[in-house]
Amino acid sequence: MGNLNIHNPKFIRSRPFSSRHYTEAAKQLDFKPDRNHDQVNSDSTRGSLQKDLLIFHQNIRGLKGKTEEIMNNITTNPPHVLCFMEHHLECHQLDYVLLQSYRLVAKFCRTTYRYGGVCIYVHESLQASNMEVLKYCKEEDLEVCSARLYLPTCTIGIVNLYRSPLGNFDYFLEEL
């Protein structure tokens, strides 16, 4: 894909930035023993913990009218990130899709063909920014959006992409 523009990220927040708020919220991510490491080398990793980052990914086949169902399905174990493919919305419509406690951080919407599109919502307790990847998008061939998550111990990138079965597979592989 080439180089991404990482020098001047645009922060998208639902409220004024407070580093204390994000630090406290990030501390509340679930801690669980890292069982894989314990099995490989129990002496050197005994007591080590990892934070679970929960990402929900769904080919939603139309986001409009499904927000209540989505929220009902994630209530018991809410993920930190929601990634949807084929949201079927125009950009101005997607901006008005509200998911309680989440904010839209990244999106791609079709302008020529119908349906398609990808988006990423991030829980409001996490700091995130959009990673600009629009120049790689081509409707049906490669529809992609990306977000950068700022966690206490690292910064990670989340990429959500979709390729229509009707799309050009060679273009998809070249740009990937």
Image (spheres, rainbow, N blue to C red):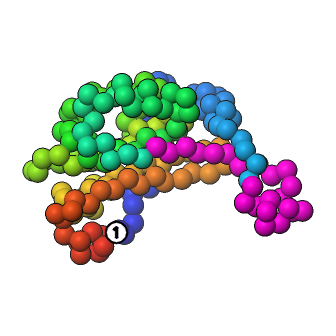
Report whether 138 appears left or right of 27.
left
Residue at mark 1: 176
Report whether 145 appears left or right of 129.
left
The one of 144 and 136 positioned closer to us in this rendering: 144
In the displayed structure, 121 sits above or below 134; it is above
Residue 169 location, x and y as percent?
A: 23, 71
Q: Secondary structure at mark 1?
A: loop
Q: Magenta span has 52?
A: yes
Report whether 134 appears left or right of 42.
left
User: Residue at image x 39%, y 31%?
Assistant: 70
The one of 168 and 130 positioned closer to us in this rendering: 168
Q: Is residue 9 visible?
A: no
In the displayed structure, 173 sits above or below 85; it is below
Residue 16 location, x and y as percent?
A: 49, 25
In the displayed structure, 122 sits above or below 7; it is above
Q: Magenta span has 139?
A: no
Residue 89 location, x and y as percent?
A: 20, 38
Residue 165 location, x and y as percent?
A: 21, 62
Residue that protrudes farthest toward the right in the picture: 43
Task: Report the quarter where the N terminus lies.
Answer: bottom left
- Which residues lie in the magenta part? 35-56
How many discs mark residues in the rendered view? Answer: 1
Task: Report the quarter where the C terminus lies.
Answer: bottom left
Q: Amino acid at mark 1?
A: Leu
The image quadrant of residue 39 is bottom right
